[in-house]
Amino acid sequence: MASRVWFRALLTVGGIMGAALVMRYTIVPSEEQMLSRISPELRAEYERNKGKRRDAHEEIMKRIMEDSKSDKPIWLAAAASERSKDGDDPRAK
């Protein structure tokens, strides 16, 4: 009896997850589809700013990788590197 309940629960959860995946792939447009639907002016602005966004993302990832090398928890290491970057860290003097 209990195994039957578990089977139904797993089947229900699997069905819900499967339906969610199907809906995601059919409803959410890809980046190319979204760009083809917007106006040419917005598309040009998107292309102009693409490099800036990529550079900002790379800078963030570089800082995260540097902060993750510390033995401290990441939130403390990130706060310390932020203070030292701004010049407000009293230990850096």
Image: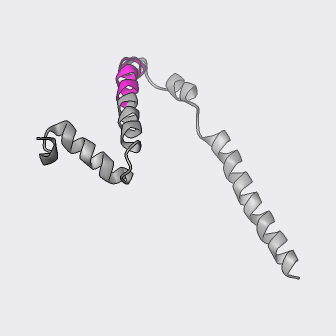
* Residue at horizontal 21 percent and vertical 37 percent from the top: 85
Above or below 73: residue 89: above
* Residue at horizontal 36 percent and vertical 42 percent from the top: 67
Q: Nearer the viewer, residue 64 or 42?
A: 64
* Residue at horizontal 41 percent and vertical 43 percent from the top: 68
Does the magenta-highlighted stretch encompass residue 27? no
Above or below 32: residue 66: below
Write down the quadrant of residue 62 in the picture.
top left
Which residue lies most toward the bottom here? Answer: 1
Magenta residues, dominant SS class: helix
Image coordinates of residue 69 in percent, x first then y, are: 40, 42
Image coordinates of residue 21 in percent, x first then y, are: 68, 48
Above or below 91: residue 86: above
68 to the left or right of 17? left
Image coordinates of residue 17 in percent, x first then y, are: 70, 56
Question: Which quadrant does the N terminus fall into?
Answer: bottom right
Question: Which quadrant does the C terminus fall into?
Answer: top left
Image coordinates of residue 26 in percent, x first then y, are: 67, 40
Residue interval drawn in magenta: 42-56
